[in-house]
Amino acid sequence: MNKQPKLMSLSRMRDLIEPHLQQMLKSLFINNELAIIHGDHSIFRIVQQQQPPFIINDHRMGVIMKGEIHASFNLVEKHVKAGTLMFIGPGSIINPIEISDDLEVYGFGLSPDFPMPFAPGQLPAAFNGQVRDFQLPASEADIATALQIIDTLWHVVHQHDYNRALVSSLVAAQMHHYDSLFRRYADQQQGLKSHEQTIFDRFIYLINQHAVQEHHMAFYASKMCLTERYLGTVVRQASGITAKEWIDRALVTRIKVELRHTDKTVAQISDEMNFPNPSFFSKYFRRLTGMTPLEFRE
């Protein structure tokens, strides 16, 4: 039986840090459904050593208080600095590139088993799947509110009796706080965005959703009710990279995850990713990476 992709889940992270857990308890809490980082940065170093990119299958929210992270979030490279609120959602592909030595993060991750404090369909808009990740520059007051919630959550989980209902309520408060800031920031950015940038953002969203199965421009142009030529022109003007290159980036990133973290055969991956045959798949991968799938796996 084939193994499922080795996601960078909370349980996987717990296994990785187990040898170091006693030294990290002053700034890290983790159980089966929740992880809290309280000023720690060493966990990111440990994770970075595990051959990225990684797939995230849960909700993660944090505040960068010091230092910075250079990483690819769902294909888009970003430098995230102190004073930023971050969210990474289920299905995200993350590739950490560089982490500063003085990084200091406060935040939490929720496993798929966490009792979400919302009725089905009632998640705040920022977390309902419309976006997979966001990074928000925040005011001192907004950061102080986020930190106060995290500090309270940290205090509650260390009480003798683990109050699950209270933990859930504090998570809800933080999600509402982030959602409010996300909507405000999105409204501000929408007023500043050009029509071309809006098209580009929509294109990136679509390839993150569909590139595993849909490899051709025609699909995305049709989804956006645009001609292929116009879409290609806009994407290149907005990013300096062709639309086909963006599709290839998304597809190759996912192929690498499958090759590195599963025992699926090349033929199985080829079939699952909608290639006509394994030979075509191998030639495609080699053309873009300089290696065959088996060479990359080894």
Image (cartoon, helix red, strand yellow):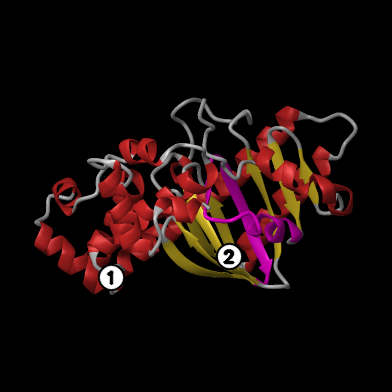
Q: Is residue 213 left or right of residue 123?
A: left
Measuring 34% from the left and 45% from the top, which residue is drawn there? 209
Frontmost residue, 215 versus 117: 215
Q: Can residue 276 be seen at all in this image of the molecule? A: yes
Measuring 58% from the left and 32% from the top, which residue is drawn there? 112
Q: Which residue is mark 1?
A: 241
Question: Is 9 one of the magenta-colored residues?
Answer: no
Task: Name above or below for residue 67 compared with residue 10.
Answer: below
Closer mark to the observer between disc 1 and disc 2:
1
Q: Are marks 1 and 2 in contact (CB under 8 Å)?
A: no
The amino acid at mark 2 is Thr
Q: Which residues are magenta?
A: 42-67
Q: Can residue 201 be seen at all in this image of the molecule? A: no
Q: Which residue is mark 2?
A: 84
Q: CA distance from mark 1 to mark 2?
A: 27 Å
Measuring 50% from the left and 51% from the top, which residue is drawn there? 297
**At which x and y percent is residue 258?**
46, 44
Question: Is 53 one of the magenta-colored residues?
Answer: yes
